[in-house]
Image (spheres, coloured by chain):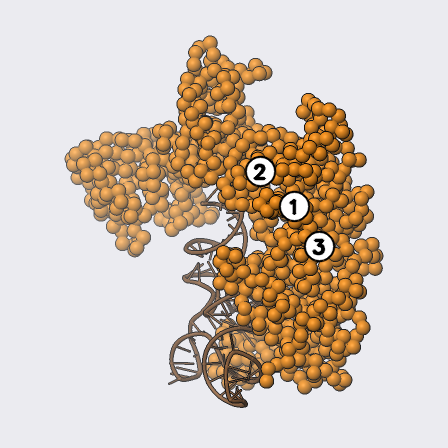
Chain colours: A orange, B brown
Amino acid sequence: MARESYNHSEIEPWAQKKWDDGKIYEVDLTDQSKEPYYLLNEFPYPSGDLHVGHWYAFAITDIFARFKRMQGKNLLFPIGFDAFGLPAENAAIKRGLDPKKWTYENMDVMRTQMRTMGGSFDWSKEVVTCSPEYYKWTQWLFSRLYEHELAERKEAPVKWCPHDQTVLANEQVVDGKCERCGHEVEERILTQWFFSITKYADRLLTDLEGLPWKEEIKSAQREWIGKSEGAKLAFTLSFKKNPSDNDWRDEDGKPAQLAVFTTRPDTLFGVTYLVLAPEHPWVTAALDGEHDVLTNESAVRAYVEETKKKTELERMENKEKTGVALEGIMAIHPLTKEEIPVYVADYVLGSYGTGAVMAVPAHDERDFEFAKKFDLPIKPVVSMTVINEHNPPVEGKPNTKRNVIHAILRNPADDTYLVGFLKDESWGDRKPVNFVIGGVDQGEDWAEAAAREIREETGYTDIVLEQEVGLPINAYFYQAQKEVNRDSDVRTFVFTLKSDEKEETDAEEKSKHDFKWLTADEVTAQLNVPSDQIIWRFYQSGGFATGEHGRLVNSGDFTGRDSNEAMWDIVAAAGGERTINFRLRDWLVSRQRYWGCPIPVVYDPEGNAHLIPSEHLPWLLPEDVDFTPSGVSPLATSEELKDRVTGIFGEGWTPEYDTLDTFVDSSWYFMRYLAPNDDTQFSNADLMKKWLPVNRYSGGSEHTTMHLLYSRFFYKAMYDLALVPTAEPFYERFNRGLIMGPDGQKMSKSKGNVINPDEVVAKFGADAVRTYLSFIGPYNEPGNYPWKPEGIEAMRRFLDRCYALRTKVSDTPATEEEQKALAKAALKIGTDIERFKLNTAVSALMILVNALEDAAEISKDGFGTFLRLLAPFAPHLADHLYSEILKSEDSIHTQDWPTFDERLLSEDMVIIGVQVAGKRRGEVSISPSASEEEAVLAALSDANVQKAMPNGQPSRVIYIPGKILNLIP
RNA sequence: GCUGGAGUGGCGAAAUGGUAUACGCGCCUGCCUUAGGAGCAGGUGGGGCAACCCGUGGAGGUUCGAGUCCUCUCUCCAGCACCA
């Protein structure tokens, strides 16, 4: 016989009507009797179709909302629409619809659909960002930011989307493409409105520390803000074109200085050239003829023009270094006073730091690549520290310093290298394979020492010094025979073999090594002494020595000091200053689009910007516009707007045509929920004090570096203007996961794997969908969960089993077993909902139902408790049974969350594992309050335990009552 | 490349340092049925007849005891990326 099934299409509308009629979810924000709790969801865009993602966002947080309400909180769970935005405008362009009408109709559809979720939203506080009542205050807040120089109009390189015909904020460019439409963005120099988010970079970063957010959210924001500490150093430019010009000075009459930013000022002595970004002002000025010093102006101009033409993406993809020397000028090194060449190259970004860098090819991979390509000198200034991991220095042993040479002998006849294989068998598999190594005698020349060592160890005498490998090394190891730590300064010399001429080596040397001639590949494969491996790699690559810190060499007075320790002394000596740089750019808020909040600004006949006075707010969006995208805002086509401006401000005054980025609208909506209909203020100060910060904010991970960062900035700016009570807007933040199609792929119409929630709800009911989505995976961490059709069926089966329990309800008093099962479930479900672990909460509910099914009868009280536990997940069914079976007039959703006597949670007898020496050998059923003696006695009566304990009594016992007993024989 | 997160059955996934795989899906066996894509009962990490042994990406370590803590390493996901 098929199991009895409840009729969701009757029950659910019944319950929804009951809740609406009772207005049970309308919050009195001024209620002092209950503790306020503000649960916020990112509000939806009214696209007109409610998809599974909306269900996951809203129906699942609704479970938490219902739980908090039952816990006695005065719960604010508002809803609204982020209603400005491109889709409305695109509907207008493509299908000739009115964006306003389109948006408002969509909202109507979505409100109806959202009701089917059984959500406990407080619709009475709904906000709609495209309504003049709302955007009046967006404009008002813009004005406050402008007054405090946090909104400014400036010329800057900006991202332009050719498809959407508008500028974008940096955050809206993903991998060089428009975040909305996926088209490649271009760079343009335009005058636009910006919010000065960079002024808050440091606070946005440091205030993250105090927030109990997941590390992944914090680190994504940290990365986006991108703080780096370093120094600003100045190089003097000198000019060589003609002698009369060679002392070019800036406007103040000072010698021209070129500032660079570096995080590695300790490598200053390794600078062998400078690089300017193609956008660098000095380059622009030079090409504009302001300083007529370049002797290759046309080549520079050609290069700069060429980089301008490249898109963001092309510049990112092509990592091959390009550039042009600025001929006619040289830079003077601030410490060595050497003249060094200056280049323009697009691997340096105009928008970061000073747009100029000091290049240290020995210690920076990008500079190294460039130096290789342009044949520039490579000068190592930080020695490599090599700690021998097989014989590391031993703490407490004396340190001895030593000068050591390594010698590479190359035979040019067949391009082979001489490598020594140690004979000493005591090394086993780790027998050293290395180049010639030897100590430098007192007063001896390093290179001579190297030649001597080659003669003594190998016998070859007809050799000539080719070069020194420019990488000095500090090798640290422990010399066991002498019980000392060795701290060796190592230099390496390369010799060329002229002929096979040899002298006899002494017997001792012969017994130590076998020397073999190896090809370069064989050397790479067989060499196994760390310092020689590094030298070899350096020699082969031609000079790149990684970016690590170590001992300074070739660094004038600083030679020999630790690079970290000496860093700021070098900056001081060079007259530089410590600075901090951020990757974060100012937030570009202008959009050349129609369906957005008008920027409340007008221009006087001289073109100066003026705020529109408050009495004219809301500054209405004109309706007589041509939507055809033209690269200029459609507002420019409105006659009404022009007339309005002339009418109010006078002839010659012109409107601002751009609208605001919709992220501005959504940066403050959560404050408006507190006073959605107040037309005298943006929110209510008393209520903000009571309700902010938001207790828990749930949203999508895609907004971590957009909405979440913007609204933190916006709120902090408002905090500084004394408009809001706290420095951070959101206390807890949870990023939810994504629901994928049944095939595990992202749902999309083209893949045909889209689940339509309306259909599923019609078939299985909203309660089944809610419970299924809760069960699919943990809600407190983002993940991708495929929608399994079997899963929703299983969940409906579970709810039918819950429904079937009603036939067991009787007037008998609750058994202890029933009480215990309920108490355990209430505790587990409560703590799990609290931390958004709804999957395990549902699991606990299932365990409870399994237990109740096994009972012969269920008490009325017990059933009531069960329904309260079920209520957040299946609100319709729970309320129905509450009314039908328990004959209650009230809604179950106004009842309290069950609480229990602690004693019900403790078990009389528990089964604990018995381990012998940490391995599980058996189990005993025992009271959690049993003594250690009793536990051991019980355990030893187990045959398996006895077998594992041949000596009978344990020598040691670890006993954690109620958990584990571990016996050590 | 840098930063962060994660690797557990056939699958979604559970496990304050204390009996690894709860709960569900799927699968297997049986029952009931004219029938089953329904329902009910039982089983289900791997190896072994068994006692037992092996098992949380891999290698070490700390501990009486490690999925959980530490070191190294591999793989996947996410954020950033020519950011000096």
Chain holding disc 2 = A
Chain holding disc 3 = A
Against A690, is A458 above or below? above
The residue lying toward the viewer, choosing from A181 and A470, is A181
As drawn, which residue projects farthest toward the front? A96
Q: Position of residue A633 (x, y in %)?
A: 62, 35
First of labels 1, 3 by sequence position: 3
Disc 2 target residue: A629
Disc sitting over residue A79 in the figure = 3
The residues bearing labels 1 and 3 have C-alpha atoms spaced at a distance of: 21 Å
Q: Position of residue A55 (x, y in %)?
A: 63, 60
Residue shown at 59%/82% (left/top)?
A2
Q: Residue A229: which quarter of the image? A: top right
- Are there few (<14), some (14-19), or many (20+) residues within 10 Å of tag 1? many
Of marks 1 and 3, the one in the foreground: 1
Screen quadrant of the N terminus of chain A = bottom right
